[in-house]
Amino acid sequence: MEALAARLSHLDPDVEGVIRVVMFYDTLMRRRVDLPALARATAGLAECAAGIRLHSTGRTIRMAPDGREAAPASAPVSMTTAVTLDDEEIGTVWLEREGEPGALDEAVLDRLAIAVATVVERYGPARTTMADPALVELVISSASDDAARNRALRLLGFPGDAPIRVVAVRSGLPLEKIGGLICHGRPVKAASLGDVGIILAAAVDPARFPEDVRAGIGDAECPHRSWQDATTALRFTTARRPVIHYRDLGALALLARIPEEDMRANADVVAITKLAADPEDLRTLDAYCATGSVRQAADSLHLHHSSVARRLTQIGKSLSVDLTDPLGLTRVRLALTAWRLLGE
């Protein structure tokens, strides 16, 4: 292999050179080399430092042409290539070279990226975000025992002692994109369960959820309890609050335990259901309940406060509730939340 690398490193940038690069990496893959060996062989071939980084683990491998780990002070990165597996970007590879890229650098990095993806896929688990739904369901099922759940987590690539957060998601965006954003550089897996997406993550950054995503986040405890909490939190999400952590619900979470028939029969909820026939009234009430202030509600609706005040007076009469009274406002807030939980 070293002799072949030496011969290839001095080839002219022609078709024959590209073919020999392909042969070089084919030889490496037949020998079932690991990622450090790939980086080491690439550095020797390119005669400059070569690097590999996997997004899911944050692992970075850098090797110098002499076969040792590259020193921290290295040449600037001259070219990078994404590593993809199942149409998902799972990492990057690069060369660190002074001056312009070499004539065969592009071919070298293309083949290195393919080789890295093959190694990652071969030595499980695969580092793609999307996972086998059966394994994910085994993790979040209350019927699973600890042994089965821990085995499923290991197969999914999570350390046995690591806390796992479960996120319930509704979105038109690909789950792998959402998972990669909210848990960058750490283990994350996703699968669909009906119309709800499931994301298992070592950590979750709520601020990194993209727009048009509704998400409920469970605590990092037993995954099946975290899943139950996440789906509960998802039910409370709104356009104003598209991402909700279960712990932030507090006593509001108790509403989710009330039987639906009891909610539907409640007079305040019935009144909200009738009010919802007028989208403008519903939007005005929602803004006022969210802010507790006529002026702030008017600002959010881009209306004059006097117009909002008049509309709220009429809404209060239709609901038979005094919206200026703290108790009345509390009643309406709870009724509006219960109406949303019913999926009306």
Image (cartoon, grey):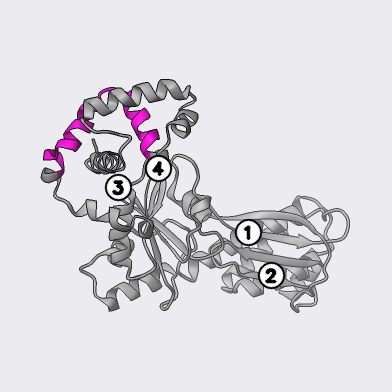
Secondary structure of residue under mark 1: helix
* Spatial separation of the CA atoms under disc 1 and disc 2: 11 Å
Quarter of the image with the N terminus in it: bottom right
User: In the image, which is nearer the foreground, mark 4 or mark 3?
Assistant: 3
Q: In the image, residue 60 lies at what x, y percent?
A: 65, 69
Q: Do labels 4 and 3 touch, CB within 8 Å?
A: no
In the rendered structure, the answer to whether residue 273 lies left or right of residue 18 reads left
Q: Residue flagged by tag 4: what amino acid is it?
A: Ser
Q: Name the residue under label 1.
A: 113
Q: Mark 3 points at which residue?
A: 235
* Spatial separation of the CA atoms under disc 1 and disc 3: 42 Å
Q: What stretch is highlighted in magenta?
A: 263-289
User: In the image, which is nearer the foreground, mark 2 or mark 3?
Assistant: 3
Secondary structure of residue under mark 3: helix
Q: Name the residue under label 4.
A: 171
Q: Residue at x 42, y 31 (%)?
A: 294
Q: Residue flagged by tag 1: what amino acid is it?
A: Ala
Which of the marked residues, 2 or 3, is nearer the chain's N terminus? 2
* Spatial separation of the CA atoms under disc 4 and disc 3: 14 Å
